[in-house]
Amino acid sequence: MAEVWNKQGKQASMEGLLGPPGAETVGHIRRLVGMYLEEVVKLRESDVEAEVKAKFDAVYHVLNLAMILYLPQDGRGEGLLGEELLDWVNDVDPGASSLLDQ
């Protein structure tokens, strides 16, 4: 069987198989998710009930984590992920970093 992916991570010529999206496509998707997250932040900061605000917080954190894990900044996933994940953890649970320092 021939190689499915070429060296650039694109689909080689095999019918019926889809490869990962290109770096440019990932960049476009990341920008769209970023715009959506900006709108969720506005909703989080608006004057709504605590229960609704908690739901917007959860939506924000889940989408932000998905963006970090699946939509890398460089579009290819060749960058470092650790610092972005630590920033996310500190945003979700600010007390977590102080527990690690002890």
Image (cartoon, rainbow, N blue to C red):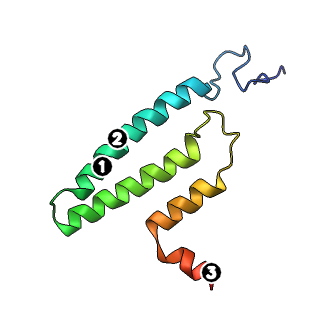
| Mark 2: amino acid | Tyr
Q: Amino acid at mark 3?
A: Asp
| Disc sitting over residue 40 in the figure | 1
Q: Give the residue at mark 3.
A: 101
Q: How many marks?
A: 3
The residue that disc 2 covers is 36
Which badge, 2 or 3, is on the more N-terminal residue?
2
Which residue sits at x=62%, y=35%? Answer: 74
Residue type at mark 1? Answer: Val
Of the residues tagged 3 and 1, which is closer to the observer?
3
Q: Nearer the viewer, residue 12 or 90?
A: 90
Residue 28 visible within the image: yes
Percent across and percent down for residue 92 are 45, 66
Relative to 89, say whether 26 is above or below. above
Instruction: Tell me the CA gap for discs 2 and 3.
Output: 34 Å
Q: Secondary structure at mark 2?
A: helix
C-alpha span from label 3 to label 1? 31 Å
